[in-house]
Amino acid sequence: MRRLRRTIVTLILLGLLGLGALLLYGHARSHPEDMPWTALDLTRPVGMFTGRKIADLADEGPRCQALLDQAGVRFTALPARGGGEQCGYDHAVRLRTDGALGIRYSPSGLGTSCSVAAALALWEWHVVQPAAQRHFGSEVERIEHFGSYSCRRLYGRDSGAWSEHATANAVDIAGFVLADGTRISVVRDWDDEAAAGRFLREVRDGACDLFATVLSPDYNEAHRDHFHLDQAQRGTMGWRACR
Ligand SMILES: [Zn+2]
C-alpha cells in the first residue's frame, strides 16, 4: 500500500515536471527574447534578456552592426579611435534617420558604441515613441543629449574607475522635443506631476530593460539634469543599475 502511494506521488511529480518543461518549451518557442540562450534579434519585442544580450555585444562590433542592419537601422560606421589603455573605441556608430529610426539627436553627430546605439533603437521603438503617443498624442522628433565619448574617469575625478563614456559606451540624455515643438527636459520636468514628468519616469523605467546602467535624478544630484545610460559589461548574470 505504502509502495503504491509512493509510486503514485512519484508519477504525479514527474507529470508536473513534464508539464512544466512543456510550458517552458512552448514559451521559449514563442518568446525567444525571454530566454538567456537564444540569439539576439533586434526585430523582436523587448524580453527579459534583451538588455543583457545587447550589453554582451561590446566585444562583437561587427555582429552588432549586422544586427542593426537586419533590423533596418541605418547608421554611419565611425573610424576606430585610439585613446591609450582606457579610452577610445572600435565599431562605434552614428545612427541615421533614413531607415527604421526617426528620432534625431541634438547636437547632431552623436556617435556611440554599437551596443548603446542598438539599445537606443529599441528604446525609440518600444519605449519612447509609445510613451509620447500615450502622454501627448505626438511623436518625439528630437532627443537632446550631453554627448557620449569622453576620455575620463567617473565624475571626471583624477583617480578611480574609468567611465563608460571613455569608450563611447554611454550616453547622457537631457531632454525630448515633440513633433509640435514641445520640449520635455529632465532638469525642469522630472518632478512634474503631469504628463511631462510621467513621460520622463516612464522612459527612464523602460530604459532599464535595455541598458546595463540607468541613472536619473532619482540617483543623485549629479544626474539632476540628465539620464546616464550605459552598457557596462558585467557578465550575462551580472548586476544592473536602474535608479
Ligand atoms: Zn553619463
Image (cartoon, grey):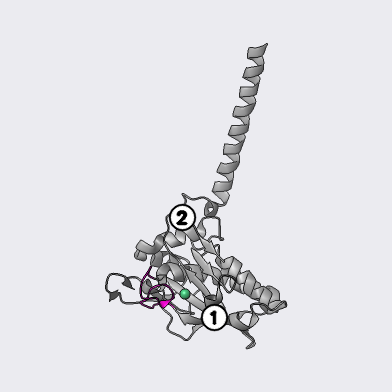
The x and y percentages for residue 157 are: 39, 76
Above or below — where is 1 with respect to 158? Answer: above
Taking the magenta stretch, the answer to whether it contains residue 171 is: no
Specify which label sits upstream in the sequence, 2 or 1.
Answer: 1
Name the residue at 28% across, 75% down.
82
Q: Secondary structure at mark 2?
A: loop
Q: Secondary structure at mark 1?
A: strand
In the depicted view, which residue is nearer to us: 121 or 43?
A: 121
Q: Residues within 10 Å of mark 1 (few under 14, many from 20)?
A: many
In magenta, the rendered stretch is 148-162
The image quadrant that residue 177 belongs to is bottom right
Amino acid type of the residue that numbered disc 2 sits on in the rendered structure: Gly
Location of residue 151 (image quadrant): bottom left
Q: Is residue 159 magenta?
A: yes
Q: CA distance from mark 2 to mark 1?
A: 27 Å
Amino acid type, residue under disc 1 in the picture: Ala
Quadrant position of the N terminus in the picture: top right
Task: Look at the magenta stretch and give its main secondary structure.
Answer: loop
Q: Residue at 65% x, 20% y: name it.
A: 8
**Which residue is the site of mark 2?**
238
Q: Is residue 89 visible?
A: no
The quarter in which the C terminus is drawn is bottom right
Q: Could you say which disc has been placed on residue 174 in the image?
A: 1
